[in-house]
Amino acid sequence: MALHKADHVPGDGGGEDVYALPISQVTLPKYRMPDSTSQPTAVRQLIFDELALDGNASQNLATFCTTWSEPEVHELMDECLNKNMIDKDEYPQTAAIENRCVHILADLWNSPDGETAMGCSTTGSSEAAMLGGLALKWRWRESRQAAGEPADKPNIVAGPVQVCWEKFARYFDVELRQVPLEADAIGMRAHQLKDYVDENTIGVVGILGVTYTCAYEPIAEICAELDRIQAEKGWDIPVHVDAASGGFIAPFLQPDLVWDFQLPRVASINASGHKYGMAPLGVGWVVWRTPDLLPEGLVFRVSYLGGDMPTFALNFSRPGGEIVAQYYNLLRLGREGYRHVYEACAKTAQALAKEIGDMGPFEVLYDGEGALPAVSWKLADPENSPFTLYDLTDQLRGRGWQVPAYPLPSHRDQTVIQRVLIRHGTGYDKISLLVDDIRTAIGRLSTARDHVAEQPGFHH
């Protein structure tokens, strides 16, 4: 019988169990790199163990973001791990795929000039929104300067916007005029604009999928009101549509809704590929109605990557995998597939809304019909309820569910609501389990004495 001697490489564990290796016998470093190397399988397993303490992404019903992807997406992401999206000379085919996505989205949003449409990918819809806002500011300033008018006090008008617009206003020195919610409203209404716009307004932001309530603001009515104001005052105020969520929903669930480049006043649209676009985290899109609406002064050209590279972004180097995954989804699903997926999501949302409404303690604010596949609700009689929605959030978290409770924006901030997003991968059966857990929680809370402290707000 032959004898064999196994080689042992110092530090590789020599075949030992990962939990018996030296790195497994100490607390993992937090402030200083270790002096020596460790076996890769042990390091991977220990990090996996820590990550297991995170919440279950599939039970995170607070997030709009993609939490499930097909195996092919994982394979494409791995293939693109080393592709830098900014280096279009080195990775021309990835750049071509990005360009295809821009044109496909321009066509989806009814651009009048789809083949020559101007747009770009970003790290998410927040960056995309800021780029849209910068273009608004630049064009307004150029127009004011050409007319010999002062251009030092720009403002932008919006309703209950996501925090990215607050960041835009603060970072780029623009006054944010937020239109407060009317007593029975869940978004900005067109007739309110007359009290907030003026000659210094660089644009109005209309939201297709309000973060707080999931409803659409009336983009066509907003544009019509701005037409009326222009006729009366002479102010030609463009609209940017923040379609972070709705941009990948409305074309399929509400194909007859007029909200996009069919409206001449809509200058630009942003959307989040990693929300209802179904791409992995890390990609957003912004598209301008026509190329001339992106001022040349905002575009930089660099030569040190090879060739003459035009770039308009807040980031520089960034991964290409999410863009390739976005293209995969557009090809894989097509219009028919996106429609089928979100019809199923909408049916699930509407079923959840009915269950919530039938429970008794709640009043449904948005029932999943006409906008995003989602549900939002409040307590029907909060003054006499034996529990708060913060209590219910806390109870559900014990079962792993993340269902946020938070106040509506100013002028309705005494109203606390809860919201559930139905995404690709959030099936009917899972939501039926949530309904069971809500009923169980209500039973417990109806006899409880202690309450969870109120939370100041919620941004996701």
Image (tube, rainbow, N blue to C red):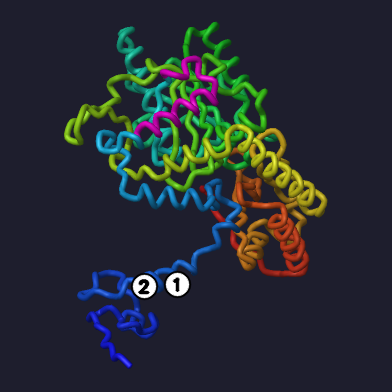
Residue 100: quadrant of the picture: top left
Residue at figure coordinates x 53%, y 48% from the top left: 66
Residue at figure coordinates x 61%, y 64% from the top left: 400
Residue at label 1? 49
Residue at figure coordinates x 62%, y 19% from the top left: 221
Residue 30: quadrant of the picture: bottom left
Kindly identify the amino acid type of the residue bearing the numbered disc 2. Thr
Residue 180 visible in the snapshot:
no
Q: Quadrant of the N terminus?
A: bottom left
Say whether residue 401 is left or right of residue 104: right
Residue at figure coordinates x 67%, y 60% from the top left: 392
Q: CA distance from mark 2 to mark 1?
A: 12 Å
Q: Which mark is residue 41?
A: 2
Q: Nearer the viewer, residue 200 or 87?
A: 87
User: Magenta residues: mostly which secondary structure?
Assistant: helix
Magenta run includes residue 323: no
Tell me residue 363's x, y (percent). 76, 46
Kindly identify the amino acid type of the residue bearing the numbered disc 1. Asp
Mark 1 residue element = helix
Tell me residue 136's x, y (percent). 40, 22
At label 1, counting other C-alpha atoms closer than 10 Å, the crowd grade (few under 14, some 14-19, many 20 or more) is: few
Q: Nearer the viewer, residue 180 or 339?
A: 339
Discs 2, 1 touching: Cβ within 8 Å: no
What is the span of residues highlighted in magenta in the rendered image? 95-116
Q: Which mark is residue 101?
A: none
